[in-house]
Image (tube, rainbow, N blue to C red):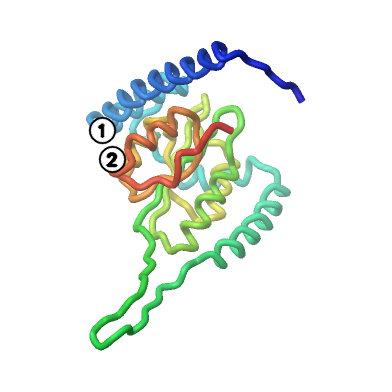
Amino acid sequence: MKILRLSSKEIQKLYERYYYNKKRVTEKVRKIVDDVREDGDRALLKYTRRFDKVKLSVKDLKVRDNEINGAYQNIDTGFIEDLKSIINNIEKFHRRQLPKSWKIKKTEGVQLGEIFRPVESVGVYVPAGTAPLVSSVYMSVLPARIAGVKRIILATPPTKFGTVDPHILAVANLLKVNEVYKVGGAQAIAALAFGTKTVPKVDKIVGPGNDYVTEAKRQVYGYADIDMLAGPS
């Protein structure tokens, strides 16, 4: 194990660098969020060209059903079999966590209790890039599905070819998620929080991401619920 012995001055420089970087990210994300809120799909296409280096049209933003259904053809069958086993284990775990509504009669005319109801819609952010985080799909979709959420939406960055990683689509298909959007980064979070003509607004946003995604979740909290502000991994 490598041990770093830093002076107080060196530690202070690290703090200052972190503060500077955080401030820079905050300002950039605020601009992106405001753009998406005001310009909707047009802003999504602009940032997709800038950050993902691919030019899409509005009709390309939503993944077509035939793309989702055909994803199996591009991946190994062993992956699907392993995935089914993983899904089975996760379902068993989360079904045990499912809370139940209850009430008791305290006195005449007075009842105490809790009612648990699912939100109507959830947006799942799935990081992609060089290493698509396929686990984010089933780890986020399954709890929502088990809780009874009616509408589950996926947002994930497109590849340089304007497609979505087939493994992500295969998992979405297996979990019966038929709304997948080719949009990533802070702009995806903003779209899910405020809605655009193409991307619907959701009640809650879940899923990990980089500093920009995390900051976007922080900024839109209140317009939509979020799961957490994940730290770096």
Residue at image mark 1: 37
Q: Nearer the viewer, residue 151 or 72?
A: 151
Residue kind at label 1, given as amino acid type: Arg
- If you read the primary sequence from the N terminus, does the residue marked by circle 1 or circle 2 appear first? 1
Residue kind at label 2, given as amino acid type: Phe
Q: Nearer the viewer, residue 211 or 146?
A: 211
Residue sitting at 38 percent across and 20 percent down?
23
Residue sitting at 29 percent across and 44 percent down?
222
Q: Nearer the viewer, residue 227 or 111?
A: 111
Query: Residue 63 at what x, y percent from top left?
Result: 44, 41
Q: Mark 1 and 2 residues: CB-CB less than 8 Å, in contact?
A: yes
Query: Residue 85 at what x, y percent from top left?
Result: 68, 57
211 on left or right of 43: right
Residue at image mark 2: 194
Label 1: few (<14), some (14–19) or many (≥20) C-alpha neighbours in 10 Å: some
104 on left or right of 54: left
Query: Residue 210 at what x, y percent from top left?
Result: 50, 30
Give the SS element for disc 2: helix
Looking at this rendering, what residue extends furthest in the bottom direction? 108
